[in-house]
Image (spheres, rainbow, N blue to C red):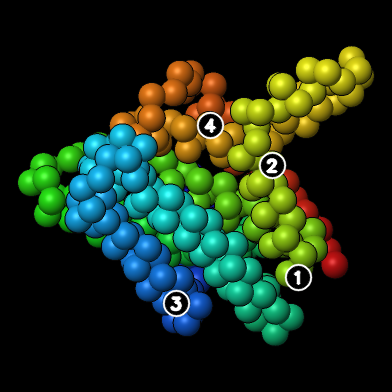
Amino acid sequence: MFNFLESIRLIRIISQSVFRAASKERLMFGFLILSLLFVLLSNVPFLINDPELFEGMPSKIASMQIGFMGINMFLMLMSVFIGLNILQDIFSDDNLSILLSKPIRRWHVLEGAFFGLFKVLFLNWLIMVSSLWLIIYFHTQELNANIWIGMSISLILVLIYISLVIFFYTLIPNAISGILTFFIIIAGFGVSLSKEFFSSASQSLFFLGKFGVELIPKINLLLGVSMNILGIFNIRINYSPIFFHTVVFLIALHILSCLRFNQPK
């Protein structure tokens, strides 16, 4: 029990250092400013009362869709680029030597980096979602709690993005880890279309394809859950398997990352 509490303390201390370092990243402020400018476009459906322009969607729904797209896009970019910058700084030879000279384990450093990055992105998420909520409240005078509930799915996606960046960085500690992360994210967007793609393939290829798809995070389906809660679309999705798969995926990815990072180099 004492070892567990000590591990939590060490991870918290490291995460605070990572949070402070990430908070000073100029790139993060650039992304945040751009994201807020994009979220401001959520005003457009209320200012231009033209149903044909937004395919017949009510102004509130169209506004949420614009904000939804902008917030998720910039959270993905922040997770990868800010994550890479911070990991390259923390895991440089000098910094890593200093960290490992203290009575901490390698996985403490890895998990501390993960939680530190998540804190920073949570703060950005809070600012962006608050901006969207205020815009919709200003125009509708409705205290719409669904915005917070629906957009909370974006935090699950952030967990996936950061975990992927860290995992690939433990394998290839350079910018290629970011490229590989984007490949997996793009593949995750196409999970719902995979059955149609592999349906015409041979049995062996279909089995391999289906097995590969099961390993990929269900990013497209998680976005679908978020859109359902927000009321943007009404998509028939079974929520339980998606969240179960996501939890297992994150746990497995963190175990693999820690095992790889613990190996002597």
Examine the rendering and report whether any part of residue 230 can be seen.
no
Closer to the chain start, of discs 1 and 4, is 1
Identified at 36% across, 37% down, the residue is: 55
Identified at 78% across, 31% down, the residue is: 212
* Foreground of the two, 116 or 213: 213
On the picture, is 234 further left or further right than 163? Answer: left
* Foreground of the two, 90 or 215: 215
Task: State the mark number for residue 30.
Answer: 3
* Residue 74 percent across, percent down from the top left: 47, 60
Of badges 1 and 4, the one in the foreground is: 4
Closer to the chain start, of discs 4 and 3, is 3
Outermost residue on the bottom side: it is: 94
| Residue receiving disc 2 | 187
| Residue receiving disc 1 | 174
What kind of element bears circle 1?
Answer: loop
Gap between marks 1 and 4 measured at Cα: 30 Å
* Foreground of the two, 191 or 92: 191
Outermost residue on the left side: it is: 141
Task: State the mark number for residue 221.
Answer: 4
Mark 1: few, some, or many residues within 10 Å (few <14, many ≥20)? some
| Cβ atoms under marks 1 and 3 closer than 8 Å | no
* Type of the residue with mark 2: Ala
Identified at 85% across, 67% down, the residue is: 265
